[in-house]
Amino acid sequence: MVSRRDFLKSSSAVSALAALPLSVRWSIANATSQIPGILSDPAAQDMFVNLVPDAMAPGFKYVPDGMGNYKVQIREALQFTGLKDSNGKLLSTPIWGYSDRNVGKRDRFTSWPGKTFEINSVSAGGPLQTQVKWQNMLENVRQHLLPVDTNAHWCYSLPGFEKYSIAKNGVPIITHLHGGHTDYQFDGNPEFFHAPGNKVVGPQWANVPGGFTEKFLYDNDVPAGNLWYHDHALGITRLNVYAGLAGFYFIRDEHDTGKADNPIGLPAWPYEKAYAIQDRMFRSTGELFYPAFPGEPFYTGFIDEEGAVLPEALFPNGGPTALAEFFGDHMVVNGKIWPKENVEQRHYRMHLLNGTDSRFMGIRFRAIADGANNPEATSLSEAGVPLDFFVIGSDQGLAKEANMVNLLMFEPGSRYDIVFDFSQVPSGTRVIMENILADAPFGGDLPPYDADDLFPERQTDRVMAFDVVVPTDTSVPDNFDPVKIAFGPRVGDVTAAEPRKVALFEGKDEFGRLQPLLGAWDPAAAEFAAIPWHMATTETPALGSTEQWDIYNFTGDAHPVHLHLVNFDICGRREISFDADDEINPQSIQQHNGSLGMAPRVSNVALGANVVKGIDEGYVENAPKDMVTALPGQVTSIKATFDKPGRYVWHCHILSHEDHEMMRVLQVV
């Protein structure tokens, strides 16, 4: 088995891909057994029993005030996820959610996920901008729901902010409209945070004319798109999102109107659905669980076996510490564990969001004959071959053409717009949404691999089910025609003289913990340099320019790379070979506190053959994207137009990675 360290030492990273590990050292198989009786056992929970909440239902959409503006509050709440205790009693889970009602601290209008925005673009008669007021109402919270590593680079470790704490000043939040075309001060950048009562606001507000505001403006002069909103506070994004802070945001235009009479025949509600797919761990008493201490899942692999040393003075009892990745053992869709949807025999449009921390998924649909009438029909061993479906769009809009597939690769942070025809199966069928990838970092390979040995009795190979039990309403036309999908991509020709070379590294922080990093080509040194968040900005595209970015992945894992502000076209991939030295002559990486970590020094980088990732492997990349899977041992090329000035960011959307330095400023100048 090849370790990450061995991979980085390889002078031919491509040749090592086939041997990449699936991280047996911290497999989910050992997660619950490490803390018997404390964690919820996923195998003991109901599967495909609870109905999935309808994120597209009219009653679950935000309603603007008389001026067309919105007010959303971040509050505490209790949520019923379908989780049960050992006696079969339903358990409630404390969360933080988004609320559109100015009522008590805990109320029925606060939810995880938050309610859905549905906004008309300018072309559909909407205003030039939508105003949303985001209020941090966690005034009485003096401890995070989850363990915060205060030794990491986070909001209250910034210069001048060390005097603040959650215990004294509350939890900082900042909402990011992911995929939004937004002026920089409204983008939800991580250093634009605000605490309850706005008594503490992030340092970047000092650079904004007029200073801090809760009222954010989002541009509507854009085509239809499947956006989402989530928290983005520096160093605790993974925790705030895990606590429940995420929701859908849809733009409608003259083609994709969301109405039954839309000109391109797309299924409309109630045949249009939206599913936020996440994974979680729970305590046996119902609370969210997030590992951070010795004896808890993943700690041994990411701390002890990496040789990390956590001083007792900084990490009492060995934590809390940030860990390099997280994989939950309960699959959650729209806030419910392993739910189901009752459907008719007709086309359904589904907006899929991968809202997990670290989990790449490979989505398939498989049927169990007569399974809808059998509560025991939960095993994939009874399911048939993968069924076909259409992918009609992605992150920021409809595709150039519809593609029929039976597998969809699904990176963290991404959204896919699909149409599934339930008339291809008989009434009474249960169709299971399957995830074929393991609970481990994704290295680019598809099964078969030793998933069954690594993760015995795992439940995360199933996401949700669709029971074909509703009589078909023939009074509602079913007019879906894939030929009518003929839209993006929409990025013009590259205007920059040379591609911008950026890179993905894996190093170690000052304690010896794994630290994923971004980097860039340093022409003076003639090498790629790993660069942490707080160092001088290197990504400075000119306003109005269209650039090609070449993303070199020098790590052993795939990374979902996200650029704020823009949508982009994926231009292609090539193999790379390189030498990487992380022992004799590594790069020194200055940490936020002035101490030093390290990253491999990469040399002898050479381009190899083109790599084609097509629909036969589940890659559908012909729609406007703001996420791209950068595979290990490859350079991935994208192109984007930077049409607003100001301070944005780009980062890996594995939330545990962006929280531990795999994020950089993107300054449009």
Image: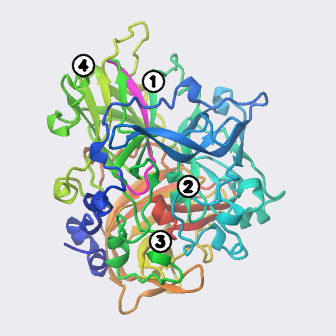
One can see residue 143 in this view? yes
Q: Foreground mark, 1 or 3?
A: 3
Residue assigned mark 3: 321
Q: Please, which residue is most extreme toward the front here?
A: 87
Q: Amino acid at mark 3?
A: Thr
Relative placement, left or right, of 512 versus 203 is: left
The residue shown at (33%, 61%) is: 35
Q: Secondary structure at mark 2?
A: helix
Q: Is residue 320 above or below residue 329?
A: below
Q: Residues within 10 Å of mark 3 (few under 14, many from 20)?
A: many
| Circle 4: element type | loop
| Magenta region | 345-360
Q: Which mark is residue 428?
A: 4
Task: Specify the quadrant of the image occupied by residue 107.
Answer: top right
Determine the secondary structure under disc 1: loop
The answer for how far apart the CA atoms under marks 1 and 4 are is 25 Å
Identified at 47% across, 71% down, the residue is 321
Q: Position of residue 435 (x, y in %)?
A: 29, 45
Q: Is residue 506 a member of the stretch shown in magenta? A: no
